[in-house]
Image (cartoon, grey):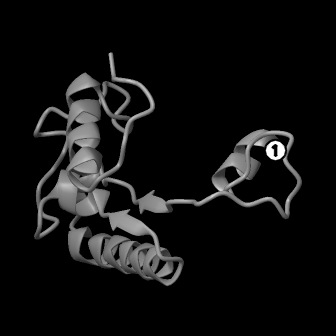
Amino acid sequence: MAGEAGRLAGRQPGQPADHRLPTVLRAYGVWMPWLSQWRQVGIVSECMANEEAVDQVRREAAEAAGAEYVSMLDVFNGPEHDEDPVEKGLIDEDGMHLNADGVRVLVEALAAAGFEASEQPQ
């Protein structure tokens, strides 16, 4: 983990902390797979307002750090955040994690924003 943190800070493993390499910062948020459950109990507006506020904080933090930000809330829940990624067939049986189609959508959204994959998804 320490090696990963160093790599993310612009260092190669084993390099001292003061030896920085050019670094590209990128960040992305999360999707909300619980839209249908929120609809069932009538709390969509309250919950989504919270998620939108968190997404905005992520966006602002990324921008302040000079990082590219991709809102997964926009990608998976649509521009109005009213689309259910479960109904779109992008969420695994566990109701939370992306399935293969969801991973494809994630990779495509990140690639469109200029993120480069270290290896091609299977």
> Who's the residue at 41% across and 25% down the image?
119
Secondary element type, mark 1: helix
Q: 96 or 56, which lies in front?
A: 56
Q: Nearer the viewer, residue 54 or 7?
A: 7
Residue 39, by quadrant, is: bottom left
Quarter of the image where the C terminus is located: top left
Q: Is residue 108 above or below residue 104?
A: below
Q: Picture coordinates of residue 44 (x, y %)? A: 23, 68
Reply above or below: 69 against 64.
above
Q: Where residue 38 appears, x then y in whole percent?
A: 26, 59
The percent position of residue 5, horizontal first and vertical second, equals: 73, 50
Residue 17 relative to residue 71: left or right: right
Residue 67 in which image quadrant = bottom left
Looking at the image, residue 101 lies above or below residue 41: above
Q: Where is mark 1, residue-wise?
A: 2
The quarter of the image holding the N terminus is: top right
Residue 16 position within the rendered picture, expressed as x and y whole percent measured from the top left: 89, 53
